Image: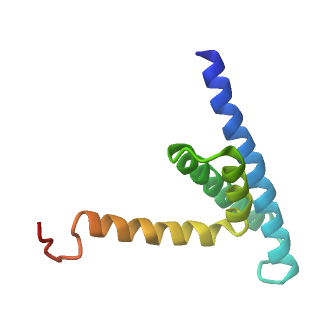
Amino acid sequence: MEQVLSIILVHEVVAVILSIVGGLGSYLQRVRNEELQKSIFNFITELVLSIITGLAVLYVGQWQVWEPALINALILILTNNGSETITTAKAYLSSFIRSKFNINGEQKNG
């Protein structure tokens, strides 16, 4: 049981490290382009959003049984400006839930 737990935690640690790299890169690029003011609050916000994105990608990838290399690549790509990724994912998820549970008020045939 300990081996399984340590393997699971290794994936999370790798995902968090890659997310921090992606968040740091995003923060520095946005500061350089003057899209974001240089502050500790903005820095921490960017890192937290990147970590949330990275862990979400990890869990979806594990659920879909994707190769670890694909998961890690997606984490690096999608954590670069994690807030946009989260916003897009929330829009898709909301749309899916609305259609799945017929929230839009449309009648399903069958």
Q: Is 51 on the left-hand or right-hand side of 86?
A: right
**20 versus 88 height, above or below:** above
Residue under the image location 53 percent in, 50 percent down: 60
Q: Is 35 on the left-hand or right-hand side of 49?
A: right
Snapshot quadrant of residue 25: bottom right
84 and 37: which is toward the camera:
84
Pinpoint residue 106: horizontal percent, then vertical percent: 17, 77
Snapshot quadrant of residue 62: top right
Pinpoint residue 102: horizontal percent, then vertical percent: 21, 69
**46 versus 13 height, above or below:** below
Q: Is 105 on the left-hand or right-hand side of 13?
A: left
Pinpoint residue 21: horizontal percent, then vertical percent: 81, 56
Residue under the image location 32 percent in, 64 percent down: 97
52 and 57: which is toward the camera:
57
Snapshot quadrant of residue 28: bottom right
**60 versus 9 height, above or below:** below
Instruction: Report the coloring of the rendering.
Output: rainbow
Residue under the image location 63 percent in, 31 percent down: 8
83 and 99: which is toward the camera:
99
Image quarter (top left, top right, bottom left or bottom right) of the C terminus:
bottom left
The residue sitting at the bottom extreme is 34
Pinpoint residue 49: horizontal percent, then vertical percent: 65, 60
Residue under the image location 27 percent in, 63 percent down: 100
38 and 106: which is toward the camera:
106
Image quarter (top left, top right, bottom left or bottom right) of the N terminus:
top right
